[in-house]
Each structure stands twice: as C-alpha cells, then as structure tokens.
Image (tube, grey):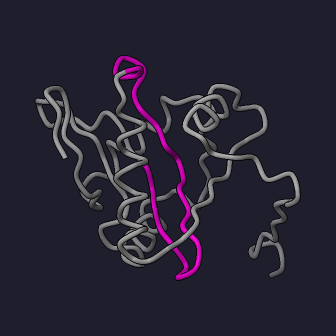
Amino acid sequence: MTSACFTLRPMTLDDYQAVYDVWKATPGIGLSASDERDAIAAFLERNPGQSVVATSADGSIVGVVLCGHDGRRGYLHHLAVLPQYRKQGIAKMLVECCLNRLRQDQILKCNIFLFRSNESGLAFWKHNRWVTRDDLSVLQFVLSSAF
C-alpha cells in the first residue's frame, strides 16, 4: 500500500533497529526483554507477513505495528508513528492493513493491550471505533520468576 508520502510493507528482522528506535521515541510504548531482537525474530517467524512498517519516500521507517494471531484472536502490539509523521493517517492505515491480513486468515476479532496512562493512545483507538472491554481483566505470570 502506497501514498504520496509513505509506503506500507511487511516488517522484516532487518527493520529491527529502526523499529526499536521508533518505539523508543514513542511515549506510551512499554519495552521489555520481550522486545529484544531475538524475541521479535521469533514473533515475526510465528506470524509471517502480519507485522507492518510505514516507510517515507527515502525508505526510512516512520511507523510500525506488530500483528499476530493464535488461530482464534488477533493481537496488535506497539503501534507507533514518529511525531513528525503523525496526523497523516499512517497509524490508521497500519492498523487497517493488519486487520485485512487477519481477515484473510479468518480471524474474527482483534485485541490490543494499552497502558491505562496512555491517554493519547486510548483516544486514537476509541476514535477508530475500538471498544474497551470492562468485563475482562488482564493477568500476567512472568515465567522467569518461577525458576
């Protein structure tokens, strides 16, 4: 998918450092060991062609979203667009691209995780018709703590 200012394409592991730099430049993105190169390589391998980057005319990565599914539900992680490229529809196009890929895999629903403190992120998702599920709670068990 292409616009006059940017192009969307599948993310590859070669994009890792530029993608990580976009994430680091984005308030509201929580980075951890799960976002290190090896972990992202495993995610991309398990979900081939699902994650997407937006590149500017010079080929620089200006936006990214991780996308995958478990066969039942889709999941988006770390949607980010560099500040100088925001308000141009890039984030919305990244999300729509991922949702179309999930539809092709016959995935009927998609979820995101968002820090409660990420007000601008929440505003984006709600503006784009995503719904907060008040009937669910997210629980997590850190596997490394069990060893």
Q: Is residue 48 left or right of residue 120?
A: left
Q: Which residues are magenta?
A: 65-87
Q: Position of residue 145 (x, y in %)?
A: 82, 72
Residue 37 forms part of the magenta stretch: no
Q: Position of residue 91 (x, y in %)?
A: 42, 36
Q: Is residue 121 left or right of residue 12?
A: right
Position of 93 relative to 5 (above/below): below
At 39% from the left and 57% from the top, the residue drawn is 98
At 36% from the left and 76% from the top, the residue drawn is 45
At 41% from the left and 20% from the top, the residue drawn is 87
Position of 52 relative to 117 (above/below): below
Q: Looking at the rendering, which quadrant does residue 84 occupy?
A: top left
Count every numbered label the image shows and give the total.
0
Q: Is residue 78 left or right of residue 83?
A: right
At 18% from the left and 26% from the top, the residue drawn is 5
Residue 82 forms part of the magenta stretch: yes
Q: Position of residue 78 (x, y in %)?
A: 52, 47
Dominant secondary structure, magenta: strand
For the C terminus, give its image quadrant: bottom right
Q: Position of residue 49 (x, y in %)?
A: 30, 67
Of residue 106 and residue 78, the one placed in the foreground of this image is: 106
Residue at the limit of the structure toward the top, as seen here: 84
